[in-house]
Image: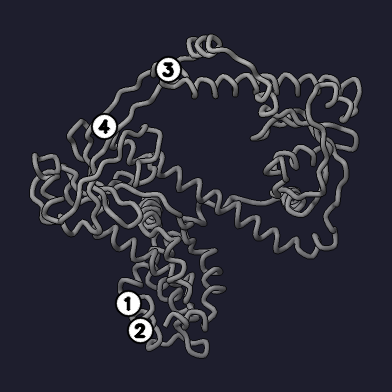
Amino acid sequence: MLKILRKKKIQKTVWIIVSVIVIIAFVFGGYITRTMNDKNNPGQIGRILGHSVTPLEFRDAVNAVRVQAVMQFGEKYNEALKYLNFEDQAMDRLYLLYAAKRRHINASDKEVTELIESYPFFQSKGVFDNRIYAEVLQYVFHVQARIFEEQTRQNIIIAKLYKQITKDILVTDAQVRNEYVKLNQKLSVDYIASIPAEFAKAFKYTEADLKDYFSKNSLDFKQPLSFNLEYITLDSLDKIKDLKGSLDKKGVFEKIAKDNGLSINETGLFDQNEPIPQLGWSAEGANIISKLKVGQCAPPIQADKKFYILRLKDKKEPFIPEFDKIKDKVKDAMIKAYSDKMAKEKIAQALNNLKADNNFPKTAKFAGIKYGTTDLFQFGTYLEGIGASDALWLAANKLKAGEYSPVITMPIGYYIVKIKSVSPVDEKRFSDEKTDFTLKLLGQMKQDAFDKFLAGLKNNQ
């Protein structure tokens, strides 16, 4: 039945609808925490903008984003499933709906009807067909009509919120030109590079040097708060839904494991800034764990479609390790500090020399650092031996012939560049593509603004 979506050209149509309705970007990986056993609110799984979210409300939101995924991917839905995180999407959807409610945004029955009747996969020969509508809902979307219609109402509300947030965003001709040039203009550069790794090779040190460095920089090696967790892995929370009392009650943790034939595992010590072993990283999860007392359980946590019940077995306060136990780390840190200092000094010397003699090969040789050139490259490409080209391209694109850049900090070192050659954009092609490119750029700018709005809701609720 999913083929009906492709036959009705669903993917093209849905993306037109998406430009109005906004399907929240899918989240790959990660996990989210659900407060399933909040003592004050036993029927909630979290709070959004001051409102309690009930399990039923969350379930309905998950169902809504599932239906949107079917609409978007059609017969490729099952293939796309492994990349989708409906739980995170559902929370995003709820944030937006509550934000829209604050703004008193609504959708009428007429708007719902008109949008549903406009979907081509509900039509026969261009006219809405009740029989097809019922069959698609039952066999493709697996949802009742009243629920689908409420989901559609919510989609319209989110679309109106999107329009409110993005209505003042405009794109100028200059912005269009700059972005088009960035994606299409090629250039090559001469460069001088001062690479810290090259100075690390020649660095000599003694045991006394290491101890002296550790003494002066001991706080750099301070180990953060760390935890050791015990955990039980469950496929579903249904197995403990009838559990009476708190998870912290003596023996309950062991009872859950025994009754379900499950083992109690340990993470081993991990830093509060590290991912939780076996579960992954989450700021929300780390925040909950940091507040636990030894022997106390956290609310169930969901990760990769499994549920984990966690109990804090041990907590180790921040401390500075003894020198002998981290000697190798001290050595690596000292070498890194030295080599980076040398690289900065050498590139600064080269920049100063260029003021007197704008000769890249000669300046690089005098400073004892690297000189090279690149082939033509575009913004966003990878340069062999250098890495991502973005910073070099942006710096070089501002230069006129003969000019050289300030020092550019790259992941592997410090660079100075000047233009070697330019392959400019094709002006006729730009003229032909400008309208479509402008629409895409404006759409991206609006989506970026809306994503920022959503992030703000989460951070400032």
Of labels 3 and 2, earlier in sequence is: 2
Residue 440, compared with residue 340, is above or below; it is below
Q: From where the camera sits, is residue 104 visible?
A: no
Residue holding disc 3 = 324
Of labels 1 and 2, earlier in sequence is: 2
Quick one: quadrant of the C terminus? Answer: top left
Q: Residue at x 38, y 54 (%)?
A: 88
Question: Mark 3: few, some, or many residues within 10 Å (few <14, many ≥20)?
Answer: few
Amino acid type assigned to the residue bearing label 3 in the image: Asp
Amino acid type assigned to the residue bearing label 1 in the image: Ala
Q: From where the camera sits, is residue 255 visible?
A: yes
Residue 227 drawn at (x, y percent): 30, 32
Q: Nearer the viewer, mark 4 or mark 1?
A: 4
Q: Residue at x 45, y 54 (%)?
A: 27
Find numbered disc 1 in the image and state the secondary structure of the residue it sits on: helix
Rounded to the nearest whole Å, what is the CA distance between mark 3 and mark 1? 69 Å
Find numbered disc 2 in the image and state the secondary structure of the residue it sits on: helix
Residue holding disc 1 = 145
Seen from the viewer's position, the closer of residues 231 and 458 is: 231
Would residue 89 appear left or right of 377 to someone viewing this image? left
Amino acid type assigned to the residue bearing label 4 in the image: Lys
Mark identifier at residue 291? 4
Q: Residue at x 40, y 49 (%)?
A: 30
Of labels 4 and 3, earlier in sequence is: 4
Residue holding disc 2 = 134
Of labels 4 and 2, earlier in sequence is: 2
